[in-house]
């Protein structure tokens, strides 16, 4: 169980990033405060700094064009990054999925 | 016994090919970083076990990795290539202005003068320097901010800084080349830069004698004679005997003066190699015959070398960073093709064999001569 104000979020990474960073397909990230896309990705990058710049811009935090974000069977890619994620993601029942868009070979 | 390590970057990963000094039997190791484009994989002149790779994809951008054990293990290092200040604008293909935007690292050049210094040539064209083994990068922005910057334009492959040459004894002197801006030289460690394109004539730009705008494909020099530079331009093979102050054409009897690679023999400063490619649209060898051309006179007089190379139905290309020479007493020459072959000669080009034939398209080839 997470500490008060802290959530354990399951994050699924695409295979190129797993291979690059030497990570499992799904990893657990500890998120302080409200669980949003911004806070989850921030916690992910803080824990695994080799991912900086590979999912969103290092300085502007804008999603890379061919990266998508899914959760609970919804495409969240165009949502405001500060919108709270579904409760099922915040409490660990559902993962937050980062994946590469279908494009090219 | 001395060894040989060939470092190959491809469209879908990196490969490391190793042999002894005889260079007849090879071990193929890879793919490293499968699925990632490896624009360049290279080693430090100071420490042959220190390797750097530029890996990128359209999905996840740029990553730089470093190995300190000859490629057995790798760690990610810095990938923050932020332009210094407001990046400004350059020419786009249609003649409009377009903001400078980082895309990828084309070339990494570990310094021969300092073990932890490494340079990176990037698209959109700029030069970055790291003095901590690639952990952090600082732009040498005097190049991009040169007065001619707004006139620079991309070649077909993008506006890339693809060649970085260090002077063998003066660490403050560097040569770089940009497609399609031209060649530049610094004598103060990268603070200020001079275009060195006098004598280049490029029919594909409005003023063929322009100070910039030339699509230089590659440069090379020999450390024993560093004022002599060789260039494969989009069209024309060129030579400078004054550190780039002036150039003259040495295409001579080549079947076509278009191509990408140019390399200098390890022990003969006037012996150079090119791979002629048909026109700027075909991008394959003349007559379906893959031939390296060698000049022992610094250009002008060329001989075809095809012994062991396919001499019929061959329509591959050899990209600009995909040729290298080793330092063995009998100089080895290596090149890779877009068809996935890596060819090696252990006798200065007289004969060739394929080390591997079926890799992804080869983007870069470097070679280390191991003690």
Image (cartoon, coloured by chain):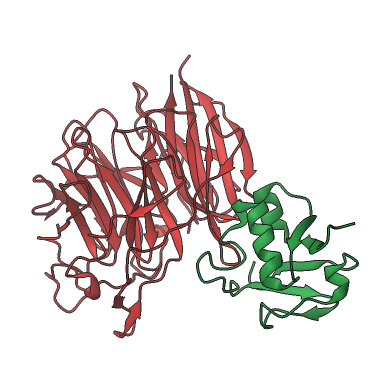
Chain colours: A green, B red
Q: Quadrant of residue A25?
A: bottom right
Residue B32 versus residue A19: which sits nearer the camera? Answer: A19
Q: From the viewer's perspective, is B151 left or right of B72?
A: left
Task: Locate the C terminus of chain A by quadrant.
Answer: bottom right
Rendered residue at 73%/49% (across/down): A23
Along the line of sight, the residue nearer the viewer: B176 or A25: A25
Give B242 or B80, whichever is nearer the viewer.
B80
Q: Name which residue lies at 44% across and 56% down.
A: B105
Expressed as whole percent of the image width and height from the top left, the position of residue A17 reads: 67, 56
Q: Is residue B271 above or below residue B19?
A: below
Residue B356, quarter of the rendered image: top right
Q: Position of residue A8 (x, y in %)?
A: 82, 60
Residue A29 image point, x, y percent: 76, 57
State whether residue B251 appears in this view.
Answer: no
- The one nearer the camera, B97 or B272, is B97
Quadrant of the drawing holding the N terminus of chain A: bottom right
Identify which residue is drawn at 72% across, 73% down.
A36
């Amino acid at each position: 169980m997470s500490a008060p104000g802290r959530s354990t979020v399951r994050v699924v990474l695409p295979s190129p990033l797993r291979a690059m960073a030497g990570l499992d397909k799904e990893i657990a990230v500890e998120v302080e405060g409200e669980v949003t896309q911004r806070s989850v990705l921030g916690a992910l990058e803080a824990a695994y700094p080799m991912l900086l710049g590979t999912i969103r811009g290092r300085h502007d935090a804008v999603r890379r064009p061919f990266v998508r974000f899914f959760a609970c069977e919804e495409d969240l890619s165009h949502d405001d990054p500060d919108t709270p994620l579904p409760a099922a993601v915040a409490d660990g029942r559902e993962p937050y999925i980062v994946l590469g868009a279908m494009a090219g070979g | 016994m001395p060894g040989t390590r060939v470092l190959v970057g491809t469209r879908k990963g990196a490969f490391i090919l190793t042999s002894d000094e005889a260079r007849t039997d090879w071990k193929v190791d890879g793919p490293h970083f499968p699925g990632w484009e490896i624009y360049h994989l290279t080693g430090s002149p100071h420490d042959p076990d220190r390797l750097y790779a530029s890996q990128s994809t359209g999905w996840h951008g740029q990553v730089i990795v470093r190995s300190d054990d000859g490629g057995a293990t790798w760690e990610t290092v810095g990938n923050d290539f932020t332009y210094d200040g407001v990046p400004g604008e350059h020419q786009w293909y249609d003649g409009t202005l377009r903001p400078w935007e980082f895309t990828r690292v084309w070339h990494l050049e570990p310094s021969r003068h300092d073990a932890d210094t490494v340079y990176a040539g990037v698209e959109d064209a700029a030069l970055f320097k790291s003095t901590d083994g690639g952990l952090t990068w600082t732009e040498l922005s005097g190049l991009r901010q040169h007065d001619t910057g707004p006139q620079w334009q991309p070649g077909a492959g993008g506006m890339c800084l693809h060649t970085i040459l260090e002077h063998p004894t003066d660490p403050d002197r560097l040569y770089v080349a940009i497609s399609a801006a031209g060649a530049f030289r610094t004598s103060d460690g990268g603070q200020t830069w001079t275009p060195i394109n006098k004598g280049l004539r490029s029919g594909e730009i409005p003023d063929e004698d322009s100070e910039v705008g030339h699509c230089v494909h590659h440069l090379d020099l020999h450390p024993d004679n560093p004022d002599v530079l060789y260039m494969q331009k989009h069209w024309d093979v060129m030579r400078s005997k004054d550190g780039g102050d002036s150039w003259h054409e040495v295409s001579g009897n080549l079947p076509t003066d278009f191509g990408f690679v140019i390399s200098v023999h390890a022990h003969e400063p006037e012996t150079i190699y090119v791979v002629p490619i048909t026109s700027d649209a075909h991008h394959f060898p003349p007559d379906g015959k893959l031939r390296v051309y060698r000049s022992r006179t610094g250009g002008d007089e060329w001989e075809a070398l095809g012994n062991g190379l396919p001499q019929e139905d061959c329509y591959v290309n050899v990209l600009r960073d995909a040729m290298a020479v080793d330092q063995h007493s009998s100089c080895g020459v290596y090149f890779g093709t877009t068809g996935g072959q890596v060819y090696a000669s252990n006798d200065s080009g007289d004969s060739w064999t394929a080390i591997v034939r079926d890799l992804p398209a080869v983007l870069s080839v470097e070679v280390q001569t191991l003690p």
